[in-house]
Image (spheres, grey):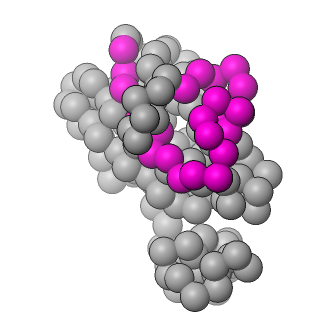
Amino acid sequence: VLRYPSYDPESAHACSLEQSPDGPIEVVTVDSVHRSEGQDLILKLDLEGAEIAALRGAAGTIRRARRTVVVLEAQPAVVKRTGIDSVECLRLLSSIRDFRFFASETGQSVAVDRPVFEQLAPGRIYNIIGESTGKASLT
């Protein structure tokens, strides 16, 4: 089911998925619908805190792609609500294959060794772009 966060109870753009056995929304993984090898991949995720789950469900596709670009939204309110820093998504991506990360709004590099909002000005929403730079890991 979709849930509105307390900080934005009016906007459908801020809804997040909450697992429910009676939920009307079917959730599938990218890997279950995309099986091609050696193609380029662009993946844009704005899932209000469910990005890590989506990346786990796309790991095979990311690994098999010739080149990959992943765009993730980093939003302070979502980090506060979930307790999960956006850098965790970057770390997961880096475990799948080599990436370089940067904020599209500033061009500033984003490292995987510390929280995103220690690297970028807090209080803003950023689109973090990950661009594959090498081969995928074998794991």
Residue 21 horizontal side relative to residue 58, left or right? right
Position in image of residue 54 (x %, y %): 52, 50
Can residue 58 be seen? no
Q: Which residues are magenta?
A: 110-133
Look at the picture and state if 102 lies above or below 32: above
Task: For the N terminus, give its image quadrant.
Answer: bottom right
Q: Is residue 17 magenta?
A: no
Taking the spot 54% from the left edge, 53% from the top edge, the residue there is 125
Residue 117 as seen in the image, left or right of residue 32: right
Q: Residue at x 57, y 31 (%)?
A: 90
Badge count:
0
User: At which x and y percent is residue 19?
Assistant: 67, 72
Q: Quadrant of residue 69?
A: top left
Residue 120 seen in render: yes
Q: Report the front residue among 68 and 36.
A: 68
**Image height check: is 104 above or below 9?**
above
Is 136 located above or below residue 58 in the figure? above
Q: Quadrant of the C terminus?
A: top right
- Give x and y (percent) for residue 127: 45, 45
Q: What percent of the width, then of the height, locates residue 29?
A: 46, 54
16 or 138, which lies in front? Answer: 16
Asked whether residue 125 is drawn in magenta, I would say yes
Furthest toward the top, the residue is 134
Q: Residue at x 53, y 82 (%)?
A: 11
